[in-house]
Image (cartoon, grey):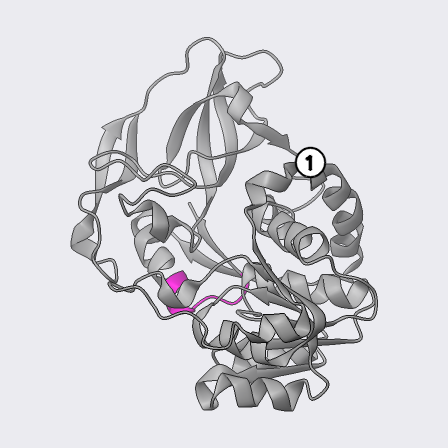
Amino acid sequence: MINREWHLLSRPEGWPKPEDFALVEAEVRRPGDGQVLVRNKYLSVDPYMRGRMSAAKSYVAPFELGKVMQGGAVGEVVESGAEGIAPGDHVLHFGGWREYATIDAKQAVKVDPEAAPLSTYLGVLGMTGLTAYAGLLRTASFKEGDSVFVSGAAGAVGSQVGQIAKLKGASRVIGSAGSDEKVKLLVEEYGFDAAFNYKTGKVSALLREAAPDGIDVYFDNVGGDHLEAAIGSLNEGGRIAVCGMISVYNNTEPAPGPRNLARLIQTRGRIEGFLVGDHYDLQPQFVSEVGPWVASGQLKYRETVVEGIENNLEAFLGVLRGDNTGKMIVKL
């Protein structure tokens, strides 16, 4: 069988360009002992992948030039050399950006397509969902009655942060997004108390208007002017969980930091970054609590689905542009 897979040809400077990548054909490798061959059905594209395109030292190894890229994927096992996984089983794994993946069985997690749609294991019930859960409840130490601000709130992570905060008893949840349509979605479907389009004015002023009594928690997906605005509106004892900073991922020069960090002294505020990989111990608790919310419709989710492996790169670039509402998924 022939596999189509995406390779990184050169490390992007600034915004990634199509010529930095190539969709190539390769022979499918049959599984050895302890391995499985998976036909991918859904692929995940996520903002953090931009960092892996750089050679800079980070928390995860960069993509190798001239080799297939990686990402979350869910698919059907077509051949197995491992006990406990049989052809016809569906698994979640990290061999994305390709049509077929031959992987070690220990790197695959069986999922049930009858319990939830396969695509949800890449989003609302997957890594993005756990990111929202761990960042809000553990890193930001959310407690009932907190006022919460979420940037990038219509995205896969942000939309869950806001809804979980409401389900857990937040006094007020505010979100920022990049279009009036997304603002409407946040308030009318996801139950946010207020939301604003950050492209319509100065973020600090828009946030003060939406949260006149300040905020206790800020979940940061954007960085830049959003982080500075949140510090300016932080109440005493406020907490900021830094999940991502999509506004600076394609900068060729370091972005200036917030100019009002001294306010953390006045508020005794705290800023803490986190990685979801440090919180997998919460996975059972996350599934047991969030799964029923999803099943009952209490926690809503959206997916932006792009079809075809040939459109994988464009889907990724769309995430960086903010084209997606909810989780960006590529369907093969």
> In the picture, which quadrant includes the C terminus?
top left
> In the picture, which quadrant includes the N terminus?
top left
Percent x, y of residue 298: 78, 62
Instruction: Give the residue pinned by disc 1.
Output: 281
Percent x, y of residue 215: 69, 76
**Badge 1 element:** helix
Looking at the image, which is closer to me, 70 or 58?
58
Start-end of magenta stretch:
319-326
Q: Is residue 274 above or below residue 148?
A: above
Percent x, y of residue 119: 56, 48
Percent x, y of residue 218: 62, 68
Q: Indicate whether residue 323 is drawn in magenta.
A: yes
Q: Is residue 316 above or below residue 233?
A: above
Whether residue 100 is visible to the viewer of this picture, yes or no, is yes
Asked whether, in this view, residue 13 is left or right of residue 134, the answer is: left
Name the residue: 66% across, 62% down: 161
Looking at the image, which is closer to me, 84 or 158?
158
State the image quarter where residue 91 is shown.
top right
Whether residue 308 is visible to the viewer of this picture, yes or no, is no
Name the residue: 80% across, 50% down: 292
Looking at the image, which is closer to me, 215 or 178?
215
Q: Is residue 152 above or below residue 107?
A: below
Name the residue: 59% across, 11% down: 83
Q: Label 1 amino acid?
A: Asp
Q: Is residue 90 above or below residue 168?
A: above
